[in-house]
Amino acid sequence: MRDSGARKWIPIRKSNLRYYEDVELFYESPTGKIMLYKPAGMPFADRALEAKPYLGALYIRPDDKIRALRSAQRGFSTDLTARVMKGGIEDLAEIKHDLTAIVDETLSEPRSGHLTVLPDYVSSVVDGYASHPDLIKYLARISHTDYTTAIHSLNVMALTIGYCYFTKRSLEETRTLGLTALLHDVGKTETNPEILTAARKLTDEEYTEVKKHPLLGADILAEYGGVLSAAIPGTLHHHLRLDGTGYPEHLRGRPISEAGRIIAVIDSYEVMTNNDRVYRSPMKPYDALVSLKEDADAGLYDKKVFANFAYSLVDTAQGGSHGARHAEQVHQSDVAEITGTIG
Ligand SMILES: [Fe+2]
Ligand SMILES: [Fe+2]
């Protein structure tokens, strides 16, 4: 059974069990047989489950994953609206936790059709924060001990949506750029995870592997077409620099899409301010902005995008007292000083 049938079953993460209440769950018996663990709709608290030999792994049918992710999306969207309507930022850590779990679950098999649920997630975040746009940037500041591609992607998404609100983009553009930000590193799901988490400098061969991720990402998105194809330009271009450096190398010196120029700045900022590699400590927002400004002046980044992004980070009074995020503040006067010579 394990060899013939089990491959068709999708293991689910214990931390995400609640998303799967509405679908049938299966377990593998000690003899390797896949058996029904719980019928669709039965709550996990049901006493009938006490007698089941739960052996630590539960499975769903492949088709049920999208259904489950969609029903989780509806639940998330309702929760988000309720939490954001309260106008506070105390619930941000929970909102982010829920979103991280979903994105992690979705990104785990990007070529299995699961990414189709993500545009609705991005829309619910964009719409959820439309009435309190200042809150979205705080979502990116919640610190994590386990920095993953999912968390990085979510942070870049939150910062990008904040940038879009600041630059008064339409909801449509904000959704598209937010989706691009969330998916810009989707190609990394096909990079050897040991390379991605290596706490040391990469070898040339390893770096060559990493540099494939924009192309792999664009390839994954092209397989989907439709709404997701709008995220291709930014995904493909986010490591290209305006001075003709960066990768993919065959695109050097060619025009870089606006999405690519925006994600380039925000992606770099996010990586600098977070603990992505154990050997390097995160930079303070001020220092990261100074460093980006130097690179913008050197012709790597779009200066206008950089200046707008820096201003989009400025703290509002409301966010100032929240304890569950980085204490580092971004002040209007600092940004004015840093961006000073940029017109
Ligand atoms: Fe990247
Ligand atoms: Fe990235």
Image (spheres, rainbow, N blue to C red):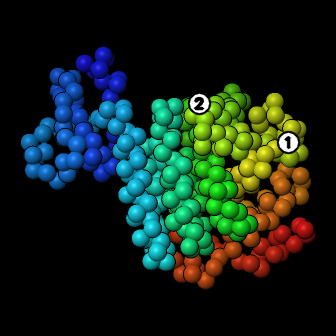
Give the side of residue 21 with respect to residue 225, left or right.
left
Across and down, in percent, residue 113 comes to 48, 34
| Residue 97 drawn at (x, y percent) | 43, 58
In the image, residue 127 sits, relative to residue 51, either above or below, namely below
**Residue type at numbered disc 1:** Pro
The residue positioned 85% from the left and 42% from the top of the image is 255
Q: Can residue 116 be seen in this view?
A: yes
Please, what secondary structure does the residue beneath circle 1 have?
A: loop
Relative to 155, is 116 above or below?
above
- Which residue is found at the position 38% from the left and 52% from the top? 72
Image quarter of the C terminus: bottom right
Q: Quick one: quadrant of the N terminus?
A: top left
Give the label, 1 or 2, closer to the camera.
2
Is 46 on the left-hand or right-hand side of 223? Answer: left
Q: Nearer the viewer, residue 297 or 65?
A: 65
Task: Looking at the picture, tell me which residue is in the foreground, 272 or 203.
Answer: 272
Q: Give residue 51's position: percent from left, percent from top.
A: 8, 42
The label number, if any, that marks residue 223 in the structure image: 2
Gap in angstroms between the C-alphas marked 1 and 2: 24 Å
286 or 228, nearer to the observer: 228
Q: Which residue lies at the image location 61% right of the left edge and 83% below the top edge?
A: 317
Please say whether residue 286 is visible from this viewpoint.
Answer: no
| Residue at 54% from the left image edge and 56% from the top image edge | 123
What amino acid is found at the position of numbered circle 2 in the picture? Answer: Glu
Q: Mark 1 points at which residue?
A: 255
The reply to whether dot 1 and dot 2 touch (C-beta < 8 Å) is no
Q: Which of the two discs, 1 and 2, labels the residue nearer the N terminus?
A: 2
